[in-house]
């Protein structure tokens, strides 16, 4: 891995350096802005912004990369028994701003969030342009779980997920994987592994392999209307 200093982005330039230049920590660049052109250019190269309020804008490309193989990710047996009893329903892109706001809310024991107001505005704009998407889980009219992220051709980069009820984020994740697999999108990028994502079925792959897969998938078309294209509408169908 490179130990080079992070690249400083010019305000009027949306180009990024090669991801192989990233520091061993995964930090690649500093600065720039969150306009749609820069965000799209970043995700197309496997780069994402991640920083806290009061910090400069930081851009990352970690090695290894954490991903879910969408066709292989399935609920574990114990959770599958719970799913069969749920009457929750599923949708996509019907409540993007709600999902984003729920993901941005501080978790128990935390006082802040990396999903700053500027980040929220940027991703809502990206959603309105058709590049950011959400998967929602409902109990009647109550939003009980969700996940949002960015599509770059046939690659979907998950940014965050939330639960308002126990299991809500798990359902959102398995639902997203099932939908993406049905659309021929083989990977859900989870960026950096942790114990929770590994427990749900995530794996790690070298950044070079991830970049090669991303390049192959970049030209693949995604559905124009994600909600209309969904292969299932009920949480219980995830175990079918």
Image (tube, rainbow, N blue to C red):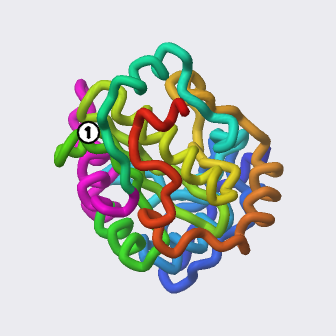
**113 relative position to 33: left or right:** left
Residue under numbered circle 1? 144
Relative to residue 159, is residue 127 depicted above or below?
below
Residue 239 belongs to magenta span: no
User: Is residue 120 shown left or right of residue 36?
Assistant: left
- In the image, residue 34 lies at what x, y percent? 42, 71
Query: x, y percentage for residue 138?
Result: 27, 44
User: In the structure shown, which secondary structural element does the residue marked by tag 1 occupy?
Assistant: strand
Q: Residue farthest to the top? A: 78
Residue 56 visible, this angle:
no
Residue at 49% x, 71% y: name it: 131
Q: Residue at x 63, y 40 (%)?
A: 68
Q: Is residue 153 above or below residue 53?
A: below
Camera-nearest residue between 148 and 14: 148
Looking at the rendered image, the quarter that the N terminus falls into is: top right
Residue in the picture at 50% in, 64% down: 229
Q: Nearer the viewer, residue 93 or 160?
A: 93
Indicate left or right for 124 with 77 as reference.
left
Provide residue 8's location: percent of width, then percent of height: 57, 68
The residue positioned 20% from the left and 43% from the top of the image is 140
- Residue most extreme to the bottom: 12
Q: Which residues are magenta?
A: 92-119
Q: Residues within 10 Å of mark 1 (few under 14, many from 20)?
A: many
Quarter of the figure with residue 157: bottom right
Q: Is residue 102 magenta?
A: yes
As displayed, is residue 91 above or below residue 16? above
Image quadrant containing the C terminus: top right
């Amino acid at each position: 891995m490179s130990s080079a200093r992070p690249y400083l982005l010019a305000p009027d330039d949306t180009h990024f350096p090669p991801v192989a230049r990233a520091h061993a920590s995964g930090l690649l660049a500093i600065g720039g802005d969150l306009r749609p052109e820069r965000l799209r250019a970043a995700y197309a190269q496997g780069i994402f912004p991640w920083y806290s309020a009061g910090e400069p804008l930081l851009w990352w490309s970690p090695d290894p990369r954490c991903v879910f193989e969408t066709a292989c990710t399935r609920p574990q047996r114990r959770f599958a028994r719970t799913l069969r009893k749920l009457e929750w329903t599923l949708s996509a892109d019907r409540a993007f701003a709600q999902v984003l706001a729920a993901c941005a809310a501080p978790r128990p024991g935390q006082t802040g969030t990396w999903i700053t107001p500027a980040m929220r505005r940027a991703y809502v704009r990206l959603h309105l342009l058709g590049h950011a998407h959400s998967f929602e889980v409902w109990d009647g009219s109550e939003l009980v779980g969700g996940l949002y992220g960015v599509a770059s051709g046939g690659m979907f980069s998950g940014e965050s997920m939330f639960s308002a009820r126990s299991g809500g984020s798990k359902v959102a994740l398995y639902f997203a994987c099932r939908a993406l697999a049905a659309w021929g999108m083989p990977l859900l990028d989870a960026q950096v592994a942790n114990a929770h994502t590994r427990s749900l079925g995530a794996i790690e792959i070298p950044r070079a392999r991830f970049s090669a897969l991303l390049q192959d998938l970049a030209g693949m078309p995604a559905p124009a209307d994600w909600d209309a294209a969904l292969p299932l509408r009920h949480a219980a169908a995830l175990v079918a």
